Amino acid sequence: SDVALLVIDATIGVTHQDQRLAERVDGAGCPIVIVLNKWELIDNEQKADIDYQLERRLHFLGDSAVLKISALSGKGVTRLFPLLAAAIDEYHTRIPTPELNRVIRQAQAQKAAPGGARVMYAMQGAAEPPTFTMFTNRELPRTYVRYLENAIREHAGLGSTPIKIRIRRR
């Protein structure tokens, strides 16, 4: 699917099953909008606990949109469709090759990879999810690949959209 809704019962919190479902959807490369239902039934202390659980247990989802709603009263439900539209737009994003290479060069200028490794050229091979191929002169550490991913994500406004990066050594 183009986007998934992960509906969590706010009175219960983030369960192990919610976490497993989120991992599977994220692994499939699908953006996720987190929907916290029954938000009106919990007090401020429980709300803070739910926010902490989201950070702790679903940290791998990055900047996924979180919508706090009440399905019974309909409060907050009207914000769902704009969030879905934004997630779908991000999922279909294409970055032109010259622009992508400019972003990579700027990121490398700000922080060089260890051991003289560098990306010589990058291109977007596919969308849905955005998939990038980087041609390097040496092996890039995982942390540096993550740094480059964050630079691309920030530049293109990809938020919660999963990004796939393939490294090709020349």
Image (spheres, rainbow, N blue to C red):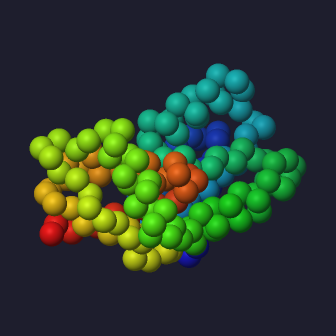
Is 109 or 168 nearer to us in this picture?
Answer: 109
On the image, the x and y values in percent for residue 71 come to 79, 53
Quarter of the image with the C terminus in it: bottom left
**Compared with residue 24, is residue 10 higher up or lower down, i.e. above or below?**
above
Is 62 or 78 nearer to us in this picture?
Answer: 62
Quarter of the image with the N terminus in it: bottom right
On the image, the x and y values in percent for residue 42 come to 71, 32
Is 81 or 21 nearer to us in this picture?
Answer: 81
Asked which quadrant contains residue 23, the reply is: bottom left
Identify which residue is drawn at 29% across, 52% down.
Answer: 145
The reply to whether residue 117 is in sight is: yes
On the image, the x and y values in percent for residue 13 come to 56, 40
- Along the horizontal axis of the image, is 64 left or right of 86? left
Q: Which residue appears farthest toward the top when viewing the image? A: 45
On the image, the x and y values in percent for residue 56 come to 44, 36
Identify which residue is drawn at 16% across, 60% down.
Answer: 137
- Along the horizontal axis of the image, is 52 left or right of 164? right
